Image (cartoon, coloured by chain):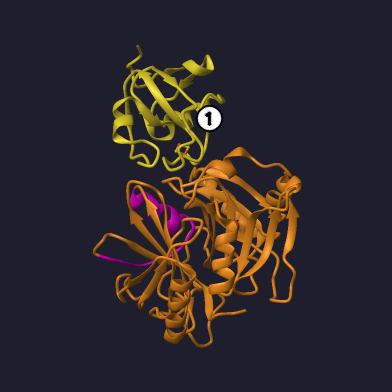
Chain colours: A yellow, B orange
Amino acid sequence: MTTDPASPYRIEVRNRHSEFLAQPGKTLLVAMELAASQAIAVGCRGGGCGMCKIRVLAGEYDRKRMSCAHISEQEQAAGFALACRVLPRSDLVIESDHFVEGL
Amino acid sequence: MKKGVMRPGHIQLRVLDMDEALAHYRDLIGLIEVDRDDQGRVYLKGWTEVDKFSVVLREADQPGMDFVGFKVLNNQTLEQLQGELVDFGCKVEDIAAGELKGCGRRVRFDSPTGHMFEVYAEKEQTGKWGIAPQNPEAFPLDLKGMKATRFDHCLLYGGDLDGTLKLFSEVLGFDLAEQVVDENGVRVAQFLTISTKAHDIAFIKHPEDGKFHHASFLLETWEDVLRAADLISITDTSLDIGPTRHGLTHGKTIYFFDPSGNRSEVFCGGDYHYPDHEPVTWTADQLGKAIFYHDRQLNERFLTALT
Ligand code: FES
Ligand SMILES: [Fe+2]
């Protein structure tokens, strides 16, 4: 796995059978948009709407505060996160499309 | 029939990080920070607004809207409305004067779409910001960012549009100014006014109650909307859509997100409404054009990204 902060992280989006390279220092969602990928749904980009909800299956990451309406503490512990609040620290394997409308 | 409600007076929004939120509402949109309280809430307003504040930010774990408040003519009107809200079946709560700094007693009530609203009669009047009350200049010189002139309206999402329309028209005296009706004659969007504006508040039908779509701030000209778009790019702010025009209300607009994911709008222009006007109707098969007059196509995000 890549840990050199200067080189991009490889993000595998398992359910979409796709991958993209994420620039370090960017949130996962913004990095995906910069890589012209559409593997994660884009909403507010601010941790509020839940549209970018993912599950991280493998890899290291930090996260900024996320709306508790979309990510409970239990879910956080199980690897669920909002991609717009996730800062990768290594290559990641993720699953996108975890947003359920009208919950 | 008018019931003594004058205008949208304030909105309280929840944000995940206060400093980031202030960079958005104060430095980018250009609202004036006027006060803070011991709960950590920050009070702001657009420079043309005569009352002390119109936007209150509160840090919390879940972004979204706490409530919208409407200013009414006087305390007698407030008493009268309180009784009618109770009779209508609203859950009504009395909030003591001073709970929001500089605001008098508020009557808070719930609604069929699951949103909380308030009416109040008194708020400290500090006057327009940065210009003299007599012989006023056109604008103050030291405005920031988009130089928003006022908090104008908000759009909320919820289920029972008919119920909330009944509450707003029968108890509060709002008119239905514009609407979208689907092929079965069901109203799926309603724009309500208490003035001659095309909307003082709006609702769109949605399976989940109590959701917040956007808070909107008024600019003067289309040039200002284009300049707002430049500022959104300069500051790398999360863009939703625009600059464009709405079919509904015909306002010229741009949508973007605050750093906690609450949507903001700045806009100018648009339709007007008088009490003898029939509601302007759009049909749901033209929804794309009704919402985005130029693209004539809805984007998924505009419908689903809510807080
Ligand atoms: S895009 Fe809205 S929470 Fe991530
Ligand atoms: Fe609006």
Is residue B167 visible to us here? yes
Q: Does label 1 point to a residue whose CB lies under 8 Å from ligand 1?
A: no
Residue B218 lies in quadrant: bottom right
Q: Residue at x 35, y 14 (%)?
A: A2
Q: Residue at x 45, y 74 (%)?
A: B129
User: Quarter for ligand 2?
Assistant: bottom right
Q: Position of residue B272 (x, y in %)?
A: 69, 70
Is residue B38 in the magenta section? no
Q: Tell me the chain of label 1.
A: A
* Crowding near the residue tagged with mark 1, few <14, some 14–19, many ≥20 C-alpha atoms within 10 Å: some
Q: Quadrant of the N terminus of chain B?
A: bottom right
* Residue sitting nearer the eye, A82 or B170: B170
Image position of B88 with respect to A95: above or below = below
| Left or right of B110 in this view: B153 | right
Furthest-left residue in this view? B38
Q: Position of residue A94 (x, y in %)?
A: 42, 20
Is residue B19 in the magenta section? yes
Q: How many marks?
A: 1
| Left or right of B48 in this view: B15 | left
Q: Position of residue B156 (x, y in %)?
A: 53, 55
| Left or right of B250 in this view: A71 | left
Residue assigned mark 1: A33
Q: Residue at x 50, y 41 (%)?
A: A102
Q: Amino acid at mark 1?
A: Glu
* Residue sitting nearer the eye, B137 or B34: B34
